[in-house]
Image: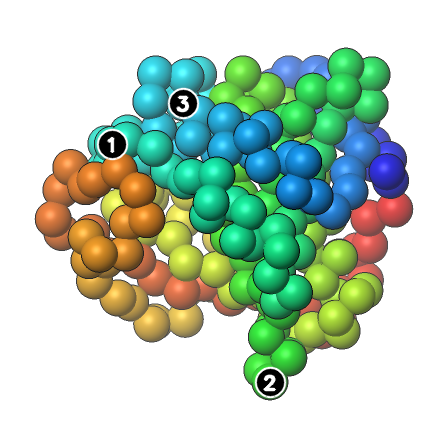
Amino acid sequence: MRAISITNRVSIDSGCTTSSSDPLVYRVATTADCDLLVTLINSSYRGELAYQGWTNENEIAYGPRTTTQAVLNKIVDDKYVVLVFFGKSDHILKGCIYLEHKPESKTAWLSTFAVRPDFQRQGYGKLILSVAENYAVNNWNVEYIELNVMIQRSELVAFYNRRGYIDTGHHQTFSLEQLKSGGALRYDLERCTMRKCVKNNENKTS
């Protein structure tokens, strides 16, 4: 696994300042990681544990965010890379992120970005996102990173804005059929596509 460092005294987007001395290590997920990933993703997005973090989907959806089969499908699909991030010292799974390669548009599609709620507010999210961007650039030579985000999650839209992502203007009504598991708590959900140009990005993460 590759190690990546996170500096002490990281100022994060929620306005809190905290410290972390445990660097992350990361690798590509395998089928043996499925159960850990399901627990991480579900607890990060919805449910009581999700309230420990600074952002969640509890106001817009309920129930599990994903299933073992859904995670397995992504891990074994050659179009996707699932990156998993562990504490170097404690070996705890602290985050994950999915990348899909779209070579026809020189784009990588980012999704299912999760940080374990009790390890949020430590700067891990920004670090994981940066590693994922660099992975796509270095391995796929992409020019753009794209993602979808619910416009109702304004704090998350703002987070991506600060990371250099802009609203492309492409908005879609989010239908209940698009929920892979769980259910919606409101029926005005809309998601926008955000994009970041990484063609000339020289900020590489070691």
- The x, y position of residue 51, in whole percent, is 38, 19
Q: Which mark is residue 154?
A: none
Give the percent coordinates (x, y) of residue 204. Answer: 82, 54
- Which residue is identified by label 1? 62
The mark nearer the N terminus, 1 or 2, is 1
Q: Residue visible at 70% across and 43% down?
A: 30
Count of marks, rendered view? 3
How far apart marks 2 and 3 lie (CA) works out to: 36 Å
Q: Amino acid at mark 2?
A: Glu
Residue for point 69% across, 73% down: 142
> Of helix, strand and loop, which one carries label 3?
helix
Q: Which residue is mark 3?
A: 50
Q: Where is residue 119 drawn, in percent x and y? A: 59, 20
What amino acid is found at the position of numbered circle 3 in the picture? Ala
11 relative to 147 in the view: left or right? right
- Mark 1 or mark 3, which is nearer the start of the sequence? 3
| Residue bearing the label numbered 2 | 104
Residue 177: horizontal and vertical position, in percent? 22, 56
Is residue 127 something that shows in the picture?
A: yes
Q: Residue at x 42, y 39 (%)?
A: 67
> Which residue: 65% across, 65% down?
78
Residue 11 visible? The answer is no
Vertical placement of residue 109 versus 92, above or below = below
Q: Is residue 125 above or below residue 112?
A: above
For mark 2, give the secondary structure.
helix
Q: Is residue 141 left or right of residue 54?
A: right
Q: CA distance from mark 1 to mark 2?
A: 35 Å
